Image (cartoon, helix red, strand yellow):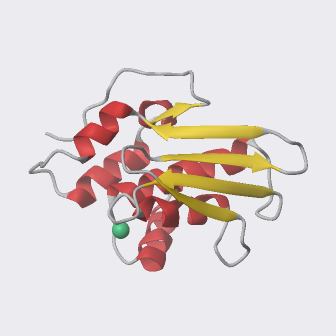
Amino acid sequence: MSQTELRSAIRFHGHLGPWLILGLRAGRYAATKLHGSPFELSAIVTCPKKPPVRCFIDGVQMGSGCTMGKGNIQHRVQNQTCAVRFINHRTREKLCLKVQPGVWTQLHTPARTPVTSIARTIYRLPINTLFVINPESRKPVVSLIR
Ligand SMILES: [Zn+2]
């Protein structure tokens, strides 16, 4: 985790939001776990077609190196979920991260906590409190809002 990484994400995307940071976390986790260069990985993001959830896609690009320009990220529209599947084409290893239902619900609930503050919380929480990974490691719901 670093302030430099956060600043780069904000510069790339334009603002600091929870969905951007969720995507960043998912992408970085996958790049580490699958030991893939940005040319060996590809990603398929399943999420709604509009922001703010769609901001997730930019975070995935930043975190994993799978980009629109290289053509190794795709978006499939689905309204009730936010997930990303990665594959390393060299090793054939796969990884799926799906936003925890409790996180999804909280981010769709009006809150007094500013979104930038929620984003910073998401930036430091353990990955398995944010995502169902692969998708068997379900964890208790964390509280993002006060
Ligand atoms: Zn955004």
Q: Residue at x 34, y 55 (%)?
A: 18
Between residues 80 and 39, which one lies in front from this camera angle?
80
The answer to whether 96 is drawn above or below residue 50 in the figure is above
- Of all residues, the one furthest to the left in this rendering is 112
What residue is rendered at 27% in x and 50% in y?
A: 118
Q: Report if residue 1 is visible in the image.
A: no
Position of residue 28 relative to residue 126, above or below, is below
Q: Is residue 33 left or right of residue 88?
A: left
Residue 145 in which image quadrant? top left
* In the depicted structure, whether residue 100 falls above or below residue 54: above
Count of numbered marks:
0
Q: Give the quadrant of the C terminus.
A: top left
Task: Give coordinates of residue 60: x percent, y percent.
Answer: 56, 59
The quadrant holding residue 53 is bottom left
Whether residue 129 is visible to the viewer of this picture, yes or no, is yes
The residue under the point 35% across, 66% down is 50
Please tell me whether residue 58 is drawn above or below residue 115 in the rendered image.
below
Q: Quadrant of ligand 1?
A: bottom left
In which quadrant of the rendered view does residue 33 lie?
top right
**Residue 105 percent across, percent down from the top left:** 26, 38
Relative to the observer, which residue lies in front, 37 or 44? 44
Give x and y (percent) for residue 92: 86, 42
- In this view, the residue in front, 88 or 24, is 88
Residue 5 placement (x, y as % from top left): 51, 65
Residue at 77 percent of width and 56 percent of height: 41
